[in-house]
Amino acid sequence: METVTTDYIASDQGDNTPILAGAVADEIVERHLAFLANYNIDPDVVDMGGTATALQLAKHQDGASNVLLLDVGARVSSATLILDGNVALVRSFHFGGATLTDAAAASKGVSFEQAERMKRSEQGPSLSEILKPQILSFCRDINNTLHAFRSQMTDRPGPDRVLLTGGGALFPDVGTLLQDSLKLPLQALDLKAHMNLEFEEEASEHWNPYSMNNALALALRDAKAKNSFNFRRGKFKKKKRYDQFRGEVKRFAVYVSVVLLVLAAGFGADYYVLKKEQGHLEQQIMSVFKKAFPDSTRIVDPVQQMKVKIREAKESLFLPTDTVLQGAVVDVLRDIAVRIPNAADLDVSSLVIDDEKVRLKGSTDDFNTVDGIKIGLQDSEYLKDVAIASAQLDNRTNKVRFELVMGRK
């Protein structure tokens, strides 16, 4: 039992349910899977020859019909008995098309290849007589199997006809010899026609029922259904997609871990270097702050404190001294803006305010507007001696460019 893989199917027969058990040598399963692996095929199902075809036949068969399906292979053939729409018996035999070819080659004294061509093309009593003993032996084994079955299952009938399939049955006289030996009506099985299937034209042209019935039955089988044998069990159980790549995933995880460790080490080194640079810069900032503001005794955030002091220093530049000016710069700006006529089309290009004078440069639409701006500024309480330093027409823009010079009170 350690060298075989087993499976079973059960026919629904009420209280007494027959169990059909099947066993296959592990080396045979290994050989088939290795052969398919060469073509990148990993099948879901490894079934017993002829059984898948018998089950498709039973599903589309008249329930009252009892049929013996003979699947003649190259070296091994199978007989599957269908009773009342259920598979009742499965048996394999060491007989096939190659058995007949060997017998023909030995009798004719030719090679196996020559005997194979002769078997497929030659007809007549000569070759049939040579092959008849082999076929009679095969039929004797079938009849013995059916007799043993009926002796154990006395309430079950025997087959009333035979359906033939398999590439080993391509010899034209095989069907006739089998029918004569089994004493049962025999006909070739065409599963495509039996199930009323329609193929594309190209597929129909190459359709050969003997060679392709089993392939069609496997294609129609539900791989997940437990209605036939499947020897992909135990150590041959099909691996899940994750299981197939588990080793690669583990190796990939190791590589990723190494990369992450290297990156973490790199980030740690960078962080250490940046931390040292930050400390050095903070020391430099503290040194600059103390030199710039030696009167500061409480230093909490030197950068922020320095920004505040710089802002205060800038604001102080706009504040006039009490001994020279009466108003702040912002007051002068507000006064100029208020006293320029609202209707004036004015673009200011430069405004310079110092301790003594104010210089206003700009452009406007005409000379009258320049005079209006001058008159408006003469009443200012912050300005005096308002004068037009220059005024001329710009031919390019057709505007008057001007400059006003005013004293500070």
Image (spheres, helix red, strand yellow):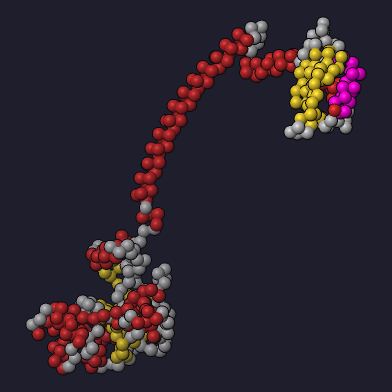
Can residue 160 be seen here? Answer: yes
Q: Residue furthest left?
A: 109
Residue occupying the point 33% across, 80% down: 206
Quadrant of res 201: bottom left
Q: Residue at x 40, y 38 (%)?
A: 259
Q: Point out the image quarter for the C terminus.
A: top right
Count of numbered labels shown in the rendering: 0
Q: Quick check: is 310 in the magenta stretch?
A: no
Position of residue 199 measured from the top left corner of the image (x, y, whole percent): 41, 80
Chain part drawn in magenta = 368-384
Residue 381, magenta (yes or no):
yes
Q: Is residue 352 left or right of residue 165?
A: right
Residue 291 vs 158, above or below: the answer is above
Residue plotted at (42% across, 88% down): 62
**Residue 185 position (above or below residue 80):** below
Q: Percent x, y for residue 193?
A: 39, 85
